[in-house]
């Protein structure tokens, strides 16, 4: 059959010759990086052979087709030292999408499409214990080979984050106003579309540069867009006063919801503009990820009492297992089919380019939507 750019070379070879071993390439971190943007030299791609001739009972073998790069990997325990005394030389783990190429597990059959949090390795054995301890979801009914990239995007962790944050944490009502930071990123681009195209809200974007502001309105359902890169600082306010002016102009009566991907001045200013019974979903803080210590916030939480406002932090994991996963996959795949959700993707090719793709999250401004490494 046609596999477009996701080759699954192994899958086809195995079908022909019953192969039980293969070369694998794996992304390693050489040492902890505690400050600044990690360089390409902080990572290494190592080759090994994976042999599943004696596959343990209930284990599966997965060939990766796509690997994700996500800002959260910059955090403690991933790339930053968690203070446990380890050196930091280790295999990196994160979200991948792939195919089951061998199975002794009754829940998985050869050919199944799988998404999950695994090692960034092109071929790997997943034991029953590992599968139980990590996140893994079956996408065979939702994704075709040529749309495998959705497994790390709209039908993966970023999609689950956007879905959970908007649908279950913020709980929008038709006609309400939502402000979303990092609005054209992997999470923000989907959160905006759910709010505007599915829930009937007015969505206000914050994004970097005129191109992304235009894209947020043409592709992701936003009505207004604020270019945070053009904010003019006043003294040492980092542009908060200017952001306040722009947000007030876009939403003179305030906002009902704020979906926070960045922290910093965006969170402070959103809180100032939050209406009675307003909600804030705290999802990420990329503006602080490369700092040794995050700056203090100006939010006065006592103000939430009489306004009955709610600020809630959340993790995507609630929508990547159990009943949350079912609702998410069912709804999101239907919205993608009906055209209410468009999945924008930026591709880097080859596992060797994983470090370059990861760095791009922090140092380039050309990525749109979800950044994905095609293996």
Image (cartoon, rainbow, N blue to C red):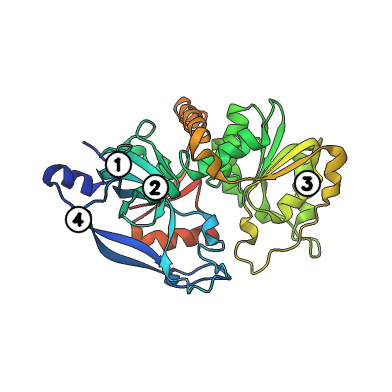
Looking at the image, do the residues carrying marks 2 and 3 touch, with CB atoms under 8 Å apart?
no
Circle 3 residues within 10 Å: few <14, some 14–19, many ≥20: many
As drawn, the label of residue 21 is 4
At numbered mark 1, what does the secondary structure look like: helix, strand or loop?
loop
Q: Earlier in the sequence, mark 4 or mark 3?
A: 4
Depth order, front residue of 343/312 = 312
Q: CA distance from mark 4 to mark 3?
A: 55 Å
At numbered mark 4, what does the secondary structure look like: helix, strand or loop?
strand
Q: Position of residue 111 (x, y in %)?
A: 27, 38
Name the residue that disc number 3 marks.
271
At numbered mark 2, what does the secondary structure look like: helix, strand or loop?
helix
Depth order, front residue of 184/82 = 82
Name the residue that disc number 1 marks.
105
Q: CA distance from mark 4 to mark 2?
A: 21 Å
At numbered mark 3, what does the secondary structure look like: helix, strand or loop?
helix
Circle 1 residues within 10 Å: few <14, some 14–19, many ≥20: some
Residue shown at 11% from the left, 46% from the top: 17
Q: Is residue 365 visible?
A: no
Residue shown at 33% from the left, 50% from the top: 64
């Amino acid at each position: 059959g046609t596999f477009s750019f996701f080759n699954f070379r192994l899958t086809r070879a195995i079908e022909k010759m019953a192969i039980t071993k293969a070369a694998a390439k794996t992304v390693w971190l050489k040492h902890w990086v505690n400050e600044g943007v990690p360089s390409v030299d902080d990572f290494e791609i190592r080759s090994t052979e994976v042999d599943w001739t004696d596959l343990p009972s209930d284990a599966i073998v997965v060939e990766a087709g796509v690997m994700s790069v996500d800002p959260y990997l910059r955090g403690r325990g991933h790339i930053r030292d968690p203070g446990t005394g380890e050196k930091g030389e280790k295999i990196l783990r994160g979200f991948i999408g792939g195919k089951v190429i061998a199975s002794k597990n009754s829940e998985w059959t050869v050919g199944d499409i799988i998404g999950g949090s695994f090692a960034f390795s092109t071929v790997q054995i997943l034991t029953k214990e590992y599968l139980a301890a990590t996140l893994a979801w079956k996408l065979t009914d939702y994704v075709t080979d040529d749309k495998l990239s959705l497994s790390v995007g709209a039908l993966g962790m970023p999609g689950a984050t956007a879905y959970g944050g908007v649908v279950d944490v913020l709980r929008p009502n038709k006609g309400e106003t939502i402000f979303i930071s990092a609005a054209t990123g992997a999470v923000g681009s989907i959160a905006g579309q759910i709010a505007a195209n599915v829930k009937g809200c007015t969505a206000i974007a914050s994004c970097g540069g005129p191109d992304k502001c235009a894209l947020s309105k043409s592709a992701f359902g936003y009505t207004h867009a604020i270019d945070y890169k053009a904010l003019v600082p006043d003294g040492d306010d980092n542009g908060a006063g200017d952001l306040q002016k722009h947000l007030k102009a876009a939403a003179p009566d305030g906002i009902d919801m704020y979906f926070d991907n960045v922290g910093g001045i965006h969170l402070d200013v959103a809180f100032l503009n939050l209406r009675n019974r307003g909600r804030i979903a705290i999802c990420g803080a990329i503006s602080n990820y490369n700092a040794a210590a995050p700056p203090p916030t100006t939010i006065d939480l006592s103000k939430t009492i009489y306004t009955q406002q709610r600020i809630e932090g959340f993790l995507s994991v609630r929508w990547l297992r159990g009943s949350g996963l079912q609702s998410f996959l069912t709804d999101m795949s239907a919205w993608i089919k009906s055209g209410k959700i468009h999945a924008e993707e930026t591709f880097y090719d080859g596992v060797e380019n994983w470090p370059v793709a990861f760095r791009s999250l922090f140092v380039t401004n050309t990525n749109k939507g979800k950044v994905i490494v095609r293996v």
